[in-house]
Image (cartoon, rainbow, N blue to C red):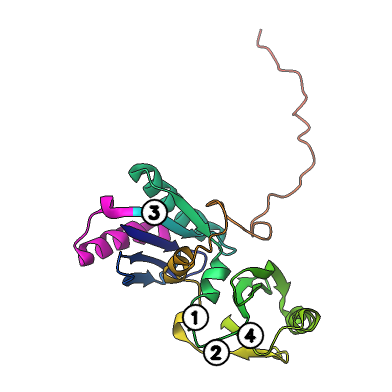
Amino acid sequence: MLSLGIETSTRCGSVALLDETGSLVSLSHQEPNAHQERLLGMVDQLLAQLGRRSSDIGRVGVGKGPGSFTGLRAGLALAEGIGLGLGIPVLGVGSLRALALQLPASCLGARAALVDARRNEWFLAVYAPTGEAIQPPCAVATEHLTEFLAGFLASRNLVSPVHLAGCWPAQVEVPAGLELHAYPNASLPSAGGVLRALALGMTDGSAEADYVREADAIRPKLPPCPLGDAAPTTSG
């Protein structure tokens, strides 16, 4: 049985397949606004690479955010479509959890995951060595990032260092007890991380998006239309 992973919470869209032997293959792209157009073709390409068919897929894991609204919708829609078409389960994995699991096994101790949320904010989560979230995904303003993490690490008395997956903003001071890494495979959430979470049984519930905050585009709160309660006119 193959496991299919899909991750589209950031500009990097990726898919991966994990076979029965534990071998993983993946593809990714970073074309703007192209998740919907590229993902299915990438899945077909991976299946051809392995000499397998879509009917060999037994489950789908999909990154559920937080992240880009349009990106998440594209990935979740594809996952649900494949699951429905093949009659297989679709499991949601937190995108920050997937990112934390992309750090190498040599990074012992707790892991923090950080992704640029735009609008001068960052999506942040911290996970214990056993995998459970000790700081669930949240959005933190750039100017409060150092203070927030320093206070959190001190209050939890975590054994140093806490390893960071993702990209720390260059202009922000790094709090004591946080160790930065520059692993290319742990800079953004990926489908490979989603499949690692599945293999470890670390799913995050149903495949429903976890946006953490409101949409970038919010419908303005306009006053009621003056014509809304008007009696319908009739033509004589």
Q: Position of residue 198 (x, y in %)?
A: 46, 63
Q: Position of residue 233 (x, y in %)?
A: 70, 16
Instruction: Give the residue type at disc 1.
Output: Ala
Which badge, 4 or 3, comes first in the chain's sequence?
3
Circles 3 and 1: CB atoms closer than 8 Å: no
Q: What's the magenta bit mostly, secondary-structure-wise?
A: helix
Q: Secondary structure at mark 3?
A: strand
Where is mark 3, residue-wise?
59
Using the numbered discs, state the Cα–Cα distance from disc 3 to disc 1 in whole angstroms. Answer: 24 Å
In front: label 4 or label 1:
1
Using the numbered discs, state the Cα–Cα distance from disc 4 to disc 2 in whole angstroms. Answer: 13 Å
Circles 1 and 2: CB atoms closer than 8 Å: yes
Viewer-side residue, 217 vs 187 = 187
Q: Look at the image and give the residue range highlighted in magenta.
A: 35-57
Rendered residue at 48%/77% (across/down)? 102
Using the numbered discs, state the Cα–Cα distance from disc 1 to disc 2 in whole angstroms. Answer: 8 Å
The answer to whether one can see residue 163 in this image is: yes
Circle 2 Cα neighbour tier, 10 Å, few/some/many (<14 / 14–19 / ≥20): some
Where is mark 2, residue-wise?
181
Circle 1 Cα neighbour tier, 10 Å, few/some/many (<14 / 14–19 / ≥20): many
Question: Would residue 37 be counted in the magenta stretch?
Answer: yes
Q: Secondary structure at mark 4?
A: loop
Instruction: Give the residue type at disc 4.
Output: Pro
Q: Secondary structure at mark 1?
A: helix
Circle 4 Cα neighbour tier, 10 Å, few/some/many (<14 / 14–19 / ≥20): some
Where is mark 1, residue-wise?
186
> Looking at the rendering, which quadrant does residue 108 occupy?
bottom right
Instruction: Give the residue type at disc 2.
Output: His
Question: Would residue 23 be counted in the magenta stretch?
Answer: no
Circle 3 Cα neighbour tier, 10 Å, few/some/many (<14 / 14–19 / ≥20): many
Where is mark 4, residue-wise?
169
